[in-house]
Every structure is written in structure tokens, then in C-alpha cells.
Image: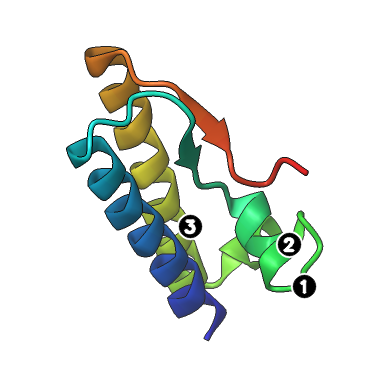
Amino acid sequence: MKAASLRKYFQCAQARIDELIADGQREGLPCPSVADWARKEGLNRSAPYRWAKSHDFSAALEFARKVQRDLNELALRKGLKFTLMDQP
């Protein structure tokens, strides 16, 4: 269940970022993080990394990391500026 939630969180964040970029936004784009997902789920920030031993959750965590790498690459190529979503 938590693996599906993590995947959905990153898929939704990625779709939202795509929309914002399509609308011309280049700064202040929300950058999703596992820590933000954990906070929204009411979990300790380190819990996802303890769960990484589970195959399902490990795959979801790798998906989240791939999304983050893709966003970083996009930012470098297009000069975009992201802001962490879990900032107060």
C-alpha cells in the first residue's frame, strides 16, 4: 500500500511540474522528495529507507529516485529552478 502511495505521489508531482512548465513557469517549481511524501503520510523521514528491503517498496523508491534524477537533468538542460516541497 505504501509503495503505491509513493509512486502516485511522484507521478502526480511529475504531472504537475509538466503542467507548470507548459504554462511557462521556470522558477519555484515544486521538487518532490521522499521526505515530503513521508511527512504527508504521517511517517518518520527515515521509514521509507528502512522499508527499502521490501521488493515492492524498493521498486517504488527507485522510481522516486528516477523522477528526481530526471527533474535534475531537466533543470540543468533548461535552466529551471526547483523548490523542495517539504520546506515549511
Q: Residues within 10 Å of mark 2 (few under 14, many from 20)?
A: few
Residue type pointed to by label 3:
Leu
Q: Which residue is mark 3?
A: 61
Tag on residue 42? 1
**Secondary structure type for disc 1:** loop
Please name whichever residue, 73 or 48, is drawn nearer the observer in this view of the structure. 73
Tag on residue 22? none
Image x and y of residue 80, in percent: 35, 20
Q: Residues within 10 Å of mark 3 (few under 14, many from 20)?
A: many
Q: Which residue is mark 2?
A: 39
> How far apart are the two marked residues, 2 and 3, measured between alpha carbons?
15 Å
- Foreground label between 3 and 1: 1
Q: Are marks 1 and 2 in contact (CB under 8 Å)?
A: yes
Q: Residue furthest bottom?
A: 1
Please name whichever residue, 61 or 85, is drawn nearer the observer in this view of the structure. 85
Image x and y of residue 79, in percent: 31, 13
Kindly indicate the quadrant of the structure image that contains residue 47.
bottom right
Image x and y of residue 6, in percent: 49, 67
Position of residue 27 in the picture relative to residue 77 (left or right): right
Q: Are marks 2 and 3 in contact (CB under 8 Å)?
A: no
**Secondary structure type for disc 3:** helix
State whether residue 45 is above or below residue 57: above
Position of residue 69 in the picture relative to residue 23 (left or right): right
Residue type pointed to by label 1:
Gly
Residue at (49%, 30%) from the top-left corner?
Answer: 28
